[in-house]
Amino acid sequence: MYNNTGKPKPQTHKKTAMQILFVADPLESFQIYKDTTFAMMRELQKRGHTLAACETKDIRWQQGENVTAFVRDISLTGEAKNWFMAKQAHPNERPQALKDFGAVVMRKDPPFDSEFFYSTHLLEHAEREGAKVFNKPRALRDHPEKLAILEFPQFIGPTLVTRDAADIRRFHAKHKDIILKPLDGMGGMGIFRVKEDGLNLGSMIETLNKDGAQSVMVQKFLPEITKGDKRILVIGGKPVPFSLARIPQGTEVRGNLAVGGKGVAQPLSTRDLEIANAIGPVLAARGLLLAGIDVIGDCVTEINVTSPTCFQEIFDQAGFDVAAMFVDALEAALTQT
């Protein structure tokens, strides 16, 4: 539970300290002033848990053995530059079975490529051996971030998924102003807008569908993007009460922070809550402890499950401690397994 400052109310019982493994990108690449994984780590360490980290390339399995990873035991220093200390000088010094960690938190950033796919299979095998993995590996595979919205047609705008150029042209003729994006894109990469004049539509189709070899998502352009592409975080099936509206700057149509969008924290609207309360419990029941629902105006455009972000931006602007809410949910989930 949380008070009106967004901070968790004091707990009346002491949690058992655990070692938590983060499967993430290289620690040296973190920008800790805004990194969500760092915020999770900081909250866990504050509560007395210990931390370890590895990359997906460090996970291995051999017949007759458990799924293991070469890990680094780390602690956070509180410094901005040298923000962590590792007991091991090199990542390959200490192997440990994933089942022996209190929890494994999968935080590898997109893209969801073949190596990410293979990693989820190794993590799922680790689950069969007793590992507790969040988000659940099978659920990560079952919810590709562009296509996951198709399950909730009542909340999305006009949308088409196809390889066929003629399909795309018919969709454009009907809706006049459209957005095209690759299914495996991330951070706003590869997104194009085509207005009523259809300028360069053929070239954009060829670029994205690779002459019919790859599927493309096409959506009606939503003019509400000028007010922001809202990231609604859902943790343990419950919405964080603030979204981060990522507002396009200049001539951009993309609000993604990675391409220069401005993030503005704001309370959830009635429609935002309707969406989050409908979708959140469904995702949580499938093992998605954390998800990010992207909403433009009243329409869901994506559901992010691989490595949702915006914890620190919301805390810095609205004062709501998203990391504390996440760790509460993680600790609660572990007591139920």
Image (tube, rainbow, N blue to C red):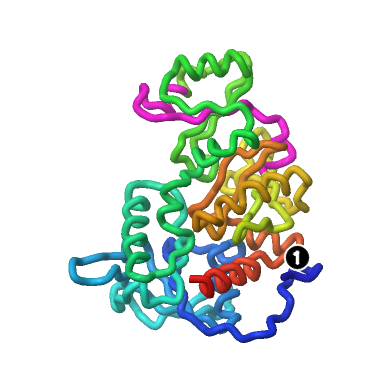
In the rendered view, tell whether residue 135 sits above or below residue 10: above
Secondary structure at badge 1 equals loop
Is 175 on the left-hand or right-hand side of 72? right
Identify the residue at image location x=56%, y=73%: 331
In the rendered view, tell whether residue 100 sits above or below residue 162: below
Nearer to me, 86 or 155: 155
Identify the magenta region.
205-229
Q: Is residue 39 visible?
A: no
Is 67 on the left-hand or right-hand side of 30? left
Q: Is residue 192 magenta?
A: no
In the rendering, at what x and y percent does residue 200 appear? Answer: 51, 18
10 Å neighbourhood of mark 1: few (<14), some, or many (≥20)? some
Identify the residue at image location x=46%, y=79%: 19
Q: Which amino acid type is marked by label 1?
A: Gly
Nearer to me, 100 or 314: 100
Nearer to me, 336 or 223: 336
Q: Is residue 327 visible?
A: yes
Identify the residue at image location x=34%, y=27%: 213
In the rendering, at what x and y percent does residue 88 appear? Answer: 36, 80
> Within the image, what quadrant is residue 136 found in?
bottom left
In the rendered view, tell whether residue 70 sits above or below residue 209: below
In the rendering, at what x and y percent does residue 122 appear? Answer: 32, 60
What is the count of numbered marks? 1
- List the residue tagged with mark 1: 319
Name the image quarter holding the N terminus. bottom right
In the rendering, at what x and y percent does residue 149 appear? Answer: 55, 39
Q: Is residue 213 magenta?
A: yes
